[in-house]
Each structure stands twice: as C-alpha cells, then as structure tokens.
Image (cartoon, grey):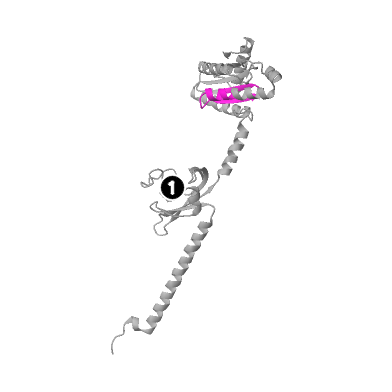
C-alpha cells in the first residue's frame, strides 16, 4: 500500500481550506480596518501626519495638505530647509521621534500653500514597537488657531495700548518700568526715564478743535516711536503727557535722543491750511542713580519736567 501525501488526505485538505478561509477573512478585516482608519483620518478637520521610525513621511490627510502643502512642503515643515538630511530640528514631531516624549499644545507659524501665514497648535505622540520598546512611528496632529491668535493679539493690544495713539498705556509702562528698574539695580546698567508733554496743548484744542489736537498727539507718538530705539518703550500717561523708558541709556543719551524728537515735532506741519503754528514740547529726564523705587524715578523726572517748564518750555532738562 502506497504512502499518501498530506495534501491528498481529506482531513488535511479540510484544515487547509479552513485556514485559507480564515486568512482571507483576516485580510479582509485588515483591509476594512485600514479603509476605516483612512476615512476617519481623512474626515478630520485637524491635519494629521505620520512619520515612520526613520522619519520618512507616511500617511497624511487632506487637512495637512490644505494647511501646510504638498508632501515636499510638509517635509520641509518637519525637517527644515534640508528635508533630505532629516536632521532633527525644533519641530515637535521630530523631537518626539528622537526621545519618544509627547509634545502637546505647541504653537507654530507656517506659510500655507496659498501664501497665507497661519498659526497651528501642534501635538506629537510616539507609537512604540511592542517587542523592542523603540519608537516605531510618530503621530503628529495640528489644528488652525489663527483666528484665536488674532483675537488674543487684539485683546493684548487693548490691554496694553493707548487707543488713540497706539503707544503703550500707563499701566503697561509702569509694569515695564518696574521690571527695567530691577534689572538696572541688579546689573548696574544705566536706565533713563523721560516725561514729556506738549506746550500749550489746551490752546490747540480750544482754537483748532479736538480733531486737530488728536492729530497732533498721534504724530507726536509716531515721532517718539520711530526716533527712539526698537527696545525703548514709549507710553502715553494721559492727555498730552507722554513718557519713555530707555533701558541701557544714560541721561545724556536720553537728552540727545529726546532733543531730536522735539526738533522733529517743531518742524512738522499739522494742518494743511497752515493756521496752526509750530507745536513744541518739553521733557524732563531722570537717570537711575540708586533710587529705592520706580516711583522715585518717576517723581525725579516730573521735577525735571517742571523745571524745564519754569525755564521757558520747549526744552529738555536732565535731573
């Protein structure tokens, strides 16, 4: 009697049939899960990008393309200008790829495919290999928070800026002066505080109207902002009284800068008809010299301003 091969035995053939059917069902289930996963990811309003263990860009959805761009643009966003080198930079996804730690709520700007710069809230989470425990992939999701950021900036502007002139308001200036005061005291670096006002401003309002007066205030604020250094702080204390915080500036530095501002003010015409005579201003300057509080520095500048007015206005006086 000859020996039968296994595949010719009825029991084996039945087991093989069952195994193949189970494999087919498993593959169908896998395809269904993949399709379901794709549909869910594609339907999300959030952008989704998946990196493999080597940093290669894998799955990404339409929202990612809409917010960031095509695959090349997404790669540059993740890795920087030289996306082929894949040198981890400061993107949350590439940092998570390195150390496996999640990143949440990271706010970033990106220039989208339409040329519009958007703010994104970015999250990154690692997927670990169950056997080795190493990072096998990184899931990066991100949402457009541009409208929220614009509202945030507007609320900050309203809280810190004078609504008429756009320079800082009194509350913000006092807070920043206190910070610079402490820095100057710790570091022994110079600090100057300036108080300025417009000469005979009430007469300008009375004779030429408040619209003209407002125009003069705005232009004076512009002169101060444009003439002083980028890190100097210009504020409006109220009415026609302005101030400036000049970190790292000596009293003489401040005198030179403010004198130029007042000269520019006097040279400017503020009405088309020429009926408004040149507007002048007066300033008092205080240099930090070991005062105990910021308020003492403010009072010192106020006294210098008063002395300048008593001396005839239209000048700068250093305390």
Name the residue located 60 percent from the left edge and 25 percent from the top edge. 235
Left or right of 196? Residue 257 is: left
Q: Can residue 235 be seen in this view?
A: yes
Q: Give the range drawn in magenta.
A: 221-244
Element on which disc 1 rests: helix
Residue 97: give x, y in percent of width and height: 42, 50
Q: Which quadrant does the N terminus fall into?
A: bottom left
Q: Quick check: 133 above or below 248?
A: below
Q: Does the segment drawn in magenta span residue 227?
A: yes
- Point out residue 80 in the picture as x, y percentages from the top left corner: 41, 43
Q: Which residue has dot 1 on it?
A: 73
Vertical order, 105 against 165 (above or below)? below
| Residue that lies at the very extreme toward the left in this rendered image | 2
Residue 16 position within the rendered picture, expressed as x and y whole percent measured from the top left: 39, 78
Between 249 and 119, the one lying in front of the other is 119
- In this view, the residue in front, 241 or 171, is 241
The answer to whether residue 94 is seen in the rendering is: no
Q: Quadrant of the C terminus?
A: top right
Outermost residue to the right: 206
Number of dots carrying numbers: 1
Q: Nearer the viewer, residue 18 or 257?
A: 257
Given the current orientation, which residue lies at the most extreme bottom position? Answer: 1
Q: Which residue is drawn at 52% across and 43% down?
A: 118
Q: Residues within 10 Å of mark 1 (few under 14, many from 20)?
A: some
Q: In this view, does 46 lie to the left or right of 170?
A: left
Q: Along the horizontal axis of the image, is 260 left or right of 15? A: right
Q: Nearer the viewer, residue 3 or 217?
A: 217
> Which quadrant of the view contains residue 129?
bottom left
């Amino acid at each position: 009697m000859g020996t039968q091969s296994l595949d010719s035995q009825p029991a084996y053939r039945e087991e093989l049939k069952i195994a193949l059917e189970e494999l087919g069902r498993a593959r169908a289930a896998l395809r269904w899960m993949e399709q379901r996963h794709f549909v869910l990811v594609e339907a999300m309003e959030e952008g989704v990008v998946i990196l493999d263990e080597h940093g290669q860009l894998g799955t990404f959805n339409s929202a990612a393309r809409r917010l960031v761009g095509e695959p090349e643009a997404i790669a540059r966003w993740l890795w920087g200008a030289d996306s082929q080198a894949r040198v981890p930079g400061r993107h949350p996804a590439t940092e998570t790829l390195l150390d496996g730690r999640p990143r949440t709520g990271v706010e970033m700007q990106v220039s989208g495919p339409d040329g519009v710069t958007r703010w994104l809230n970015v999250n990154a989470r690692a997927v670990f290999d169950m056997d080795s425990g190493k990072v096998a992939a990184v899931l990066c999701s991100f949402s457009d928070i541009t409208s929220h950021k614009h509202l945030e900036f507007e609320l900050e502007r309203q809280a810190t800026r004078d609504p008429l002139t756009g320079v800082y308001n009194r509350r913000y200036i006092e807070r920043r002066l206190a910070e610079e005061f402490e820095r100057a005291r710790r570091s022994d670096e110079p600090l100057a505080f300036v108080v300025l006002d417009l000469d005979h401003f009430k007469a300008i309002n009375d004779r030429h109207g408040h619209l003209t007066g407002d125009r003069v205030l705005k232009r004076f604020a512009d002169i101060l902002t444009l003439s002083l250094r980028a890190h100097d702080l210009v504020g409006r204390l109220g009415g026609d009284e302005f101030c400036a915080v000049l970190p790292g500036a000596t009293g003489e530095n401040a005198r030179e800068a403010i004198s130029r501002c007042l000269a520019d003010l006097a040279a400017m015409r503020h009405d088309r008809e020429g009926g408004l005579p040149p507007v002048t201003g007066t300033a008092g300057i205080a240099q930090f010299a070991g005062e105990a509080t910021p308020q003492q520095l403010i009072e010192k500048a106020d006294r210098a301003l008063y002395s300048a007015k008593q001396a005839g206005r239209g000048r700068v006086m250093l305390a």
